[in-house]
Image: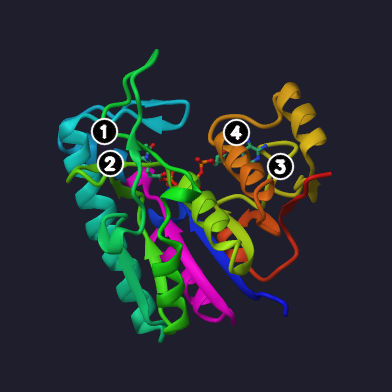
Amino acid sequence: MSKTEITIYKIGGGIIDDAAELSKFLQLLAGTSGLKLLVHGGGKGASTMMRELGLVPQLINGRRVTDAATLDIVVMFYAGKTNKQVVAALQQLGVNALGLSGADGNVLQGTKRPVKDIDYGFVGDLTSASVNAAFLQQLLKAGITPVLCPIIHDGSGHLLNTNADTIASAVAVALAGEFDVTLHYCFEKNGVLRDINNEQSVIAEINSDSYAVLKQQGVIADGMLPKLENAFAALNSGVRKVIIGHALNIGSDLHTVLCLK
Ligand SMILES: Nc1ncnc2c1ncn2[C@@H]1O[C@H](COP(=O)(O)OP(=O)(O)O)[C@@H](O)[C@H]1O
Ligand SMILES: CC(=O)N[C@@H](CCC(=O)OP(=O)(O)O)C(=O)O
């Protein structure tokens, strides 16, 4: 028997931060058929809020150094304001969404990143084994669309900040046993671009060999590096398809598709 299809969408700060774009994306999402799950970030907005509160955001390799004051802010911003606004907008659109941090329903339990060269503070690492797939399946089967924010817990009463791309990849892998999973990274560009200043230069397909070449050429940089690492990790662990494209192009063919070979 073939597996039921599910699409896991991930939206980042570039879209979350723009009320008009976010509203258009959520309308498109509400119009898609089949099972879906949404993971959101919001890193850009969290940095803005930190600056407003007199704190200096620090990101290393795309990961936020999260001290105690920063953790308070990101919990309020991701698990509070952002998550609840997205859920309210989906409810208005007729989607029965349920907003969750990793602590809710023990959906995502990870471990604090060990201090090596860099001390990231209250940042959590997780794998697909950290995901409570059985609970997510129950929600999905009950017709609920889970909306996950990038805050997880460690099982000992502590909250941890985790990159939203990593959460999307881990959730996609965890659900791949039960479902036929497509992982769709949505952001503010048309896909992985050959020329970052040219939205028409979308690379239609990237495999692990061409990825290595593009990386070496410097075509892929910054936040796109961890995104592609997470994407290939998902493909290597049973996720059927990974798409990277503009949040307002879901359902169209303008995007980058990743494949193993
Ligand atoms: N070749 C590329 N094509 C598209 N974006 C790229 C590329 N190389 C680097 N980037 C950068 O990666 C960013 C996306 O990563 P990130 O900021 O982490 O997104 P998000 O917040 O949506 O997860 C883009 O905004 C862009 O600046
Ligand atoms: C540890 C860590 O880096 N967490 C991220 C979580 C938000 C995120 O990933 O947001 P985008 O998807 O919008 O980038 C952060 O605080 O920036």
Distance in Å between CA atoms under marks 1 and 2: 5 Å
Are the residues tagged 1 and 2 within 8 Å (C-beta)?
Answer: yes
What is the three-letter code of the residue carrying label 1? Phe
Question: In the image, 46: left or right of 164?
Answer: left
Q: Give the range drawn in magenta.
A: 18-45
Residue 181 x, y percent position in the rendering: 63, 64
Residue receiving disc 3: 193
Element type where label 1 sits in the image: loop
What is the three-letter code of the residue carrying label 4? Leu
Element type where label 3 sits in the image: loop
Of tags 4 and 1, which is closer to the observer? Answer: 1
Are the residues tagged 4 and 1 within 8 Å (C-beta)?
Answer: no
Mark number for residue 122? 1
Residue receiving disc 4: 225
Picture layout, residue 40 above or below residue 216? below
Q: Which numbered disc flags the more N-terminal residue, 1 or 3?
A: 1
Q: Which numbered disc flags the more N-terminal residue, 2 or 3?
A: 2
> 43 or 110: nearer the eye?
110
Quarter of the picture containing the C terminus is top right
Residue 18 x, y percent position in the rendering: 40, 57
Residue 85 x, y percent position in the rendering: 29, 67
Question: In the image, 208: left or right of 66?
Answer: right
What is the three-letter code of the residue carrying label 3? Leu
